[in-house]
Amino acid sequence: MEMSQSMKTLFVNPPSFEGFDGGAGSRYQARREIRSFWYPTWLAQPAAMVPGSRLIDAPPDGLTVEEVAPLAKDYELVVMHTSTPSFHNDAKFAARLKQENPDVMVGMVGAHVGVLPLESMKAAPAVDWMALGEFDHICLDIASHKPLEETPGIIFRRGSSIEYTPKRPTLEDMDSLPTVIEVYKRDLTVENYFIGYLRHPYLSLYTGRGCRSKCTFCLWPQTVGGHVYRVRSVASVEAEMTLAKKYFPQVREFFFDDDTFTDDLPRAEEIARRLGRLGLTWSCNAKAIVPRKTLEIMKANGLRLLLVGYESGNQQILNNIKKGVRLDIARRFSRDCRELGITVHGTFIVGLPGETTETIRETIRFACEVEPETIQVSLAAPYPGTELFRQAQEQGWLSIQSDGLVDDHGIQAAALNYPHLSSTVIFNSLDEFYRRFYFRPRKMISLFGGMLRDPQVMKRRLREGAEFFKFLRERKNPHAEGVDAKIPAAVG
């Protein structure tokens, strides 16, 4: 396609509160405990397909509305990524784009508008269209001047009315998508992306979409990605990683952000062997059920870290959220990782259905037992479009509106309130969890040991430590009236 045939298109992850990470596949749309930014891969993908386009990722670049909005004068089409916590700010940003250029067409993509299209269109009158699911080819069609009414998979404005087009089939041939590496090189600054548990600078990519797991809280598989793991060929992944190594020699670690990279074990093993030949250090998401044989192959071929969603140390809660993991298997997996020298970053959630003060203590004890190197603790977040959100609506558990999942400072709010467990106790349990996990002599000795062995690690950990304590202070202040609502009793 000739460049002149495409609309001049700007893809943008809009400015938001400081530290907002809404481009992270919509997994964790809040400020993190330490400065963290994931790559806007979902936006980079259509940007790679539209000739002459540009991608702006405002939050990691520290760009303000005043710096980004005037760019609308230079474009015919602006595609914005939005999310539940940021939607109202993003709607205001869309209106500002129209003030700068009344002729610019504005589209919104992301899980939030796909799940609540009509409500979103009514709440964002400056937006011309919204994608109802995967949006790669939607963006390409519209940028190629295809009339909105002929573009499948969107909701759009026709005069004063709002209309839908027919559903667009799910993309099956993942190899048909171009690499995002060229867009990363052209538009992003890799040094601006930080993740506490990954070496810096890092780079993240997807090798497939969808997740076979049925976790009730997880947004992307239930809204955009689906429950079929659609993958790129091993050869395609190898070619992309070869290019990434060439373009970004400064990158110290590559992360595969597939929901569950280990869903297809033979494929994961074959990709590992190819990465081993390339001499890359890499990491990925995994469930706590990967067999030791696969772990051995991955470790021997450059795997450094696994990001593992343990969620809870209570089996009934894991069953309630359809996690598909048994605690005894998770314990064995964790032991295998320790013995093989694979670092684990464990993620946990407090406030899931069935939670009590005792199950929170149980999960803290479990976290200390399986001993990941680092952890992230989140509050249960009922995103629209998930089974957890439907449950919360039916049972009357919602303590806030869905647009209140984070506060004005981007700190995650306790969205669920149970008859036997208040949102205040859930909110305060996060601090308790972190303190009881990290402020143990064994864990502190382990972390200090790593700092002493590597001056770079020491410099980074000291910065992250300061950010972590600042985060805990900030999140406590708005809830000062609930400081006494702690989890009783010490960890056993």
Image (spheres, rainbow, N blue to C red):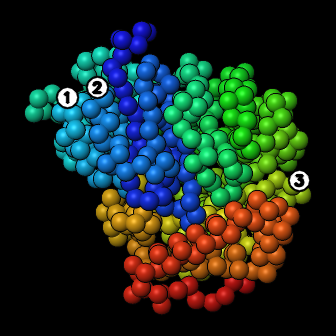
**In the rendered view, does 492 fall on the left or right side of 402?**
right
What residue type is disc 2 on?
Glu
Q: Mark 1 to mark 3: distance in Å?
A: 58 Å
What residue type is disc 3 on?
Leu
Q: Which residue is mark 3?
A: 340
Is there a contact, CB below 8 Å, between mark 2 and mark 1?
A: yes
Q: Is residue 20 visible?
A: yes
Bin the neighbour count of mark 3 within 10 Å (Cα to Cα): few under 14, some 14-19, many 20 and up: some
The quarter of the image holding the N terminus is top left
Bin the neighbour count of mark 1 within 10 Å (Cα to Cα): few under 14, some 14-19, many 20 and up: some
Q: Can you tell which of label 1 and label 3 is closer to the viewer?
A: 1
| Residue extending farthest left | 160
Q: Secondary structure at mark 1?
A: loop
Q: Which residue is mark 1?
A: 103
Residue lying at 62% horizontally and 37% vertically, measured from the top left: 205
Q: Is residue 115 visible?
A: no
Residue 480 picture location, percent across and down: 41, 85
Q: Nearer the viewer, residue 104 or 69?
A: 69
Residue lying at 74% horizontally and 44% vertically, measured from the top left: 252
Residue 323 picture location, percent across and down: 60, 54
Residue lying at 67% horizontally and 80% vertically, measured from the top left: 436
Q: Earlier in the sequence, mark 3 or mark 2?
A: 2
Q: Earlier in the sequence, mark 2 or mark 1?
A: 2
